[in-house]
Image (tube, helix red, strand yellow):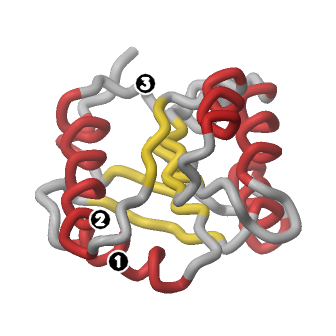
Amino acid sequence: MVEAVSSRAIEILLVEDNPGDARLTQEALREGKIRNNLYHTRDGVEALAFLKREGEYAKAPTPDLVLLDLNMPRKDGREVLAEIKADSRLRFIPVVVLTTSEAENDIVRSYELHANCYITKPVDLEKFTAIVRMIENFWLEVVTLPNRNENAA
């Protein structure tokens, strides 16, 4: 069953270790058209705890979308992506890799791990904001997302 996303706030998990990029993403989404709840984790260990509802994240919602950086401390985005897509409870969540890396091997590996898309962060502030708004527009207005039934297997 597909849940109408326009009738509720969209849950977004931002996995980003760079405080500046996290702030810019938060601001761009706050100024956007879609009602959303943005959650931020600073590394892959925190992200997986959030997604699996462990420890301090026991009551975390299931995100409709994950924005994932690749190069992070403790557990990098490639490892997080692999774990998300290997978990039957999480693999349906769209994962957008949003990273500074333009390396072909990172792009190929991300798609091998079943990333839903790969976007290289622009260094220009206006372009970065525009990219975040395009992500919002596509993933939250155009795409039909599955019902985030908390008990879905």
Q: Going 60% across and 34% down the picture, which residue do you hit?
A: 107
Crowd rating for badge 1 (residues with CA inside 10 Å; few <14, some 14–19, many 20+)? some
Q: x and y percent of residue 27 in the render?
A: 28, 77
Of residues 64 and 80, the one drawn nearer to the viewer in this rendering: 80
Q: In which quarter of the image is the N terminus?
A: top left
Q: Is residue 138 above or below residue 32?
A: above
* Amino acid residing under circle 2: Phe
Q: Distance between the residues labelled 1 and 2?
A: 8 Å
Q: Going 36% across and 61% down the picture, which residue do you hit?
A: 122
> What mark, if any, has residue 128 been given in the picture?
2
- Decide which of tag 3 and tag 2 comes sooner along the chain: 2
Q: x and y percent of residue 133 in the render?
A: 21, 55
Q: Nearer the viewer, mark 3 or mark 1?
A: 1
Q: Going 18% across and 54% down the picture, which residue do you hit?
A: 34
| Kind of element beneath mark 3 | loop
Report the side of 48 relative to 41 (left or right). right
Q: In this view, does 116 lie above or below 42?
A: above
| Kind of element beneath mark 1 | helix
- Cβ–Cβ under 8 Å for marks 1 and 2: yes
Of residues 108 and 139, the one drawn nearer to the viewer in this rendering: 108
Q: x and y percent of residue 139 in the render?
A: 31, 37
Q: Name the residue under label 1.
A: 24
> What mark, if any, has residue 146 been given in the picture?
3
- Cβ–Cβ under 8 Å for marks 3 and 2: no
Report the side of 114 relative to 24 (left or right). right
- Decide which of tag 3 and tag 1 comes sooner along the chain: 1
> What mark, if any, has residue 91 been given in the picture?
none
| Kind of element beneath mark 2 | helix
Q: Going 55% across and 33% down the picture, which residue do you hit?
A: 93
Q: In this view, does 14 lie above or below 111?
A: below
Q: Quadrant of the C terminus?
A: top right
